[in-house]
Image (cartoon, grey):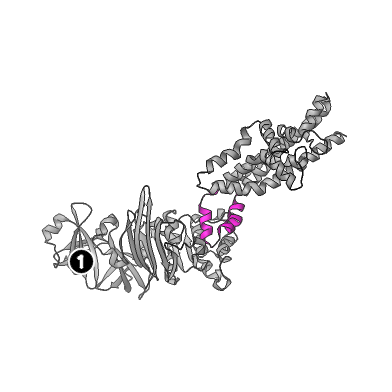
Amino acid sequence: MLLSADDLQAIWLTLRLAGIVTAILLVIGTPVAWWLAQTRSRWKGPISAVVALPLVLPPSVLGFYLLLALGPSGWIGQLTQSLGIGLLPFTFWGLVVASVFYSFPFMVQPVQNAFEALGERPLEVAATLRASPLDTFFTVALPLALPGFLTAGILTFAHTVGEFGVVLMIGGNIPEITRVVSVQIYDHVEAMEYADAHRLAAVMLIFSFLVLLALYVWQHRGQRRT
Amino acid sequence: MDTLSARFQLNWPSFQLKVDLQLPGRGVTALFGHSGSGKTTLLRCIAGLERAQRGFVSFKGEIWQDAKIWLPTYRRPLGYVFQEASLFPHLSVLGNLRYGMNRIAVAERRSLDQAIELLGIEHLLERKPARLSGGERQRVGIARALAVSPRILLMDEPLAALDLKRKQEILPYLERLHDTLEIPVLYVSHAPDEVARLADHLVVMEGGRVLASGALTETLARLDLPIRLGEDAGVVLDATIVERDTQWQLARAEFAGGSLWSRDHGLAIGRRVRMRVLARDVSLSTEHQENTSILNLLSGVVDAVADDDHAGLALVRVQIGASVLIARVTKRSAAALGIAAGRQIWVQVKSVAVME
């Protein structure tokens, strides 16, 4: 066997985390992206800046604030406690919440760009064809922005797979619960198990390359078609 | 009866729209003006795609906009044709046609067949818009607007994005629309030839205001407006083909007050046509010219004389029976011939455009 049971467990955990985070972000990132693409509000600038923050903040800074917010005296922590969920740090769902924040711009920005690229015209055409704004969103904006969604989904998934700092701050290093691939590699290196680290790192490298390759090949074909 | 009332006051930093219009409930009304005259903005305000700060729109007794009411575009019973066809690229031609039709009440739905047949797009239904020519796309765009069974059709320069060949391809379809549609059509255009061919009613716009609004033939014959038309100043006459000269390939069409010869386009005798006579193709003479290459010689009475856009030119309106022609002549000639209102004059028409 090339990979140990622990390694496979870390890979499964990572894929599960990335899948759930991508699904959640599709649901909450899309309305934000639509609002940012459509609004003429003066809040567009500040909101865009907040959305983009995870792009520039060190993951440890984001993780630190999330740890405080999710902790016993943080406002999210108090909320989850009062709802009977308990505290999220050092749990799988704590990782999910943290990753949702961390990967937010990777979902919102490509989708927002796709919506903005549509322009006003298709939406106006739909209005003259009796479609209400909500109808227009689902039958015109969404299908036309589909390539943007695919890009956003792949980037979000891949970015969540690749995170490390936030995971360490929020999730720690608990096998089966929060020990994702990047942390597992770190553990191997700490324990001087370079051969194990190599195998897992190679898997990550090949995975990342294949994801990006698929994305760019697909985008290139899309461009040639239009 | 007036069926569309529109009043708007719109103040943009670089543009002002201020109009108060009553438009007829039948036929084609052309909103004519140069670019920047506000004709497209006016159309968009009527459609609800633009919202004027102060505005009032009512259509057949139903208020679309006033101080309190704002009916969004998707609840106004109109069809809209954009300058670029703007078909939905993710839907086939048939999908585009059905998009609007599926969103109106079942009782109001009419068969798509009529619109498909009228625009001649039967063979395109399965195609994606990317695989259509510009002219085909615009025909589908018009059919799509008709598929919502609109009670009024708004068209924003549907030919402007097309080259001359494609325009010639679409114009016959527009003429068929003109003949078969029972709903009023608002047609925005900056091309005088389209207006002359298609319109029954003319609204001339400039700088966000309405300069004139009235029946096409009367409005074109107004001497205070041709100045804005420049080279395209001229009149349109309703006429009937009465004679065909097969030897010389000519046809004679009779209008109220006389008749004119033009090239024979194969139209049958008895056929109703429109004739467009440009002011630059009309010359005047005080005597009956015998030896001239010009076939069309009419006798009339000078009705009015006005300055043209160049200081050396004048526009002369001549009454011929119940019709009028406008001639563009130099002021020197006008003075030499003693042209003034009431003078008997011979009118020579060098060129006539016959339109079905």
The quarter of the displayed image where residue A181 is located: top right
- In this rendering, would B174 be left or right of B311? right
Q: Vertical placement of A71 versus B11: above or below?
A: above
Label 1 is found on which chain of the structure?
Answer: B
Q: Residues within 10 Å of mark 1 (few under 14, many from 20)?
A: many
Q: Badge 1 is on which residue? A: B318
* Secondary element at tag 1: strand
Front-most of residues B132 and A190: A190
Q: Residue furthest top?
A: A192
Query: Residue at 59% across / 39% down in the picture?
Result: A50
Front-most of residues B26 and B158: B26
The quarter of the displayed image where residue B268 is located: bottom left
Which region of the structure is painted magenta?
A118-145
- In this rendering, would B16 be left or right of A66? left
Q: Which quadrant of the rendered structure holds the N terminus of chain A? A: top right
- In this rendering, would A166 be left or right of B81? right
Q: Residue B118 at what x, y percent from top left?
A: 49, 68
User: What amino acid type is highlighted by mark number 1?
Assistant: Val
Task: Specify whether residue A139 is painted magenta.
Answer: yes
Q: Residue B354 at what x, y percent from top left?
A: 34, 66
Figure label count = 1
Q: Residue A133 at what x, y percent from top left?
A: 56, 57
| Whether residue B244 is visible | no
Query: Residue at 52% across / 49% down in the picture?
Result: A119
Q: Residue furthest right?
A: A1
Q: Vertical placement of B241 versus A149: above or below?
A: below
Front-most of residues B203 and B226: B203
Q: Residue furthest bottom?
A: B270
Task: Specify whether residue A172 is painted magenta.
Answer: no
Q: Residue B220 at what x, y percent from top left?
A: 29, 63
